[in-house]
């Protein structure tokens, strides 16, 4: 979420001072142990949306490539919230389970 979101949305405006503080903080400790993620053995199946308005495609691909045993479903036919959207949710799950089952077509 961009800090401006908290200034542009009347509902979120009361939280804008906190959002500004968080946005300006630069000394965060690592959120994940990247070495451990690279050695992951648990199957991971991820949907990556090319036209995602919240997560850059390049960042999503790079992140997934750093997780061991991760398979991705990449699409430009859906958006960020597809897994929770009527009519798209089933398609996302079908594609993710196809990755699990190693179905090519």
Image (cartoon, rainbow, N blue to C red):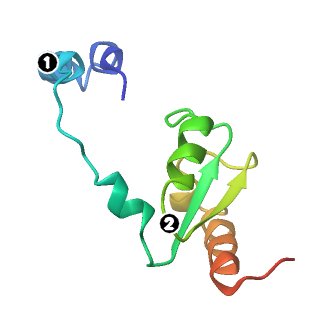
Q: Residues within 10 Å of mark 1 (few under 14, many from 20)?
A: few
Residue found 57% across the figure and 54% down from its top: 65
Query: With respect to residue 42, does 21 lie above or below?
Result: above
**40 on left or right of 66:** left
Query: With respect to residue 96, does 11 lie above or below?
Result: above
Cα distance in 3D space between marks 2 and 1: 34 Å
Can you tell which mark lies on residue 68?
A: 2
- Residue 25 in percent (x, y) is at 17, 21
Q: Quadrant of residue 57?
A: top right
Can you tell which mark lies on residue 41?
A: none
Q: Residues within 10 Å of mark 2 (few under 14, many from 20)?
A: some
Query: With respect to residue 52, does 72 lie above or below?
Result: below
Q: Nearer the viewer, residue 12 or 51?
A: 51
- Residue 83 in percent (x, y) is at 54, 61
- The quadrant of the rendering that contains the C terminus is bottom right
Residue found 70% across the figure and 79% down from its top: 98
Secondary structure of the residue carrying tag 1 is helix
Give the mark toward the camera: 2 or 1. Answer: 2
- Residue 21 in percent (x, y) is at 14, 18
Residue found 56% across the figure and 34% down from its top: 56
**92 on left or right of 102:** left
Can you tell which mark lies on residue 21?
A: 1
- Residue 80 in percent (x, y) is at 55, 46
């Amino acid at each position: 979420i961009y800090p401006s979101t908290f200034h542009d949305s009347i509902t979120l405006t009361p939280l804008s001072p906190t959002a500004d503080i968080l946005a300006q903080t630069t000394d965060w400790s690592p959120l994940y142990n990247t070495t451990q993620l690279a050695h992951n053995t648990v199957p991971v199946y991820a949907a990556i949306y090319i036209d995602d308005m919240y997560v850059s495609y390049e960042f999503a691909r790079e992140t997934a490539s750093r997780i061991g045993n991760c398979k991705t479903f990449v699409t430009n036919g859906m958006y960020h919230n597809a897994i929770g959207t009527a009519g798209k949710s089933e398609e996302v799950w079908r594609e993710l389970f196809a990755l699990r089952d190693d179905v090519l077509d």
